[in-house]
Image (cartoon, rainbow, N blue to C red):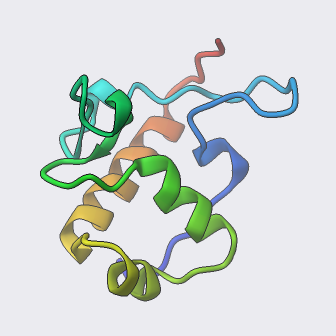
Amino acid sequence: MSGYVLTPLAKADIEEGEKMATLEWSQCPAVESIPGKVSGAWVLRGTRTPVKVLFENLESGMSIEEVIEQFPVTREQIDSLMAFVARSLDKAPTYG
């Protein structure tokens, strides 16, 4: 996978009062949330890199290659994360 198109639905939280699809991050093998590690935020497994930070940077225009240069993440981790998001968005949305 060489490129990804991110939409606001890729975010796992609700912004500006709008309801968005919620991703079930506990089902993503590429991420983990450990109490006391980055305040329990969802991070890429084995790192302290929050998923939210990755999406914020990608959404603001950073390329996958730039993300890999700036954060301690691998192409495989990003590919796994994006594959999970793509699969999740193909399912019927759940709204919180």
Residue 60 percent across, percent down from the top left:
69, 71
Q: Position of residue 29 (x, y in %)?
A: 18, 40
Residue placed farthest to the top in the image? Answer: 96
**Can residue 71 be seen at all in this image of the molecule?**
yes
Quarter occupied by the C terminus: top right
The answer to whether residue 85 is above or below residue 77 is above
Choose between 71 and 39: the one closer to the eye. Answer: 39
Tell me which residue sits at (20%, 55%) in the image.
47
Say above or below: 80 vs 41: below
User: Which residue is rendered at x = 65% and y = 65% of the image?
Assistant: 59
Residue 86 visible in this rendered orientation of the protein: no
Report the number of discs: 0
Left or right, residue 16 beside residue 37: right
How far across and how far down the image is residue 16, in percent?
Answer: 87, 32
Residue drawn at the location 66% of the way across and 43% of the way down = 9
Q: Is residue 15 above or below residue 75?
A: above
Is 7 located above or below residue 64 in the figure? above
| Residue in the foreground of this view, choosing between 2 and 26 | 26
Q: Residue furthest left?
A: 46
In this picture, residue 25 sits left or right of residue 19: left
Instruction: Locate the N terminus and report the quarter of the image it occupies.
Output: bottom left
- Residue at 33% across, 39% down: 38
Quadrant in which residue 93 is drawn: top right
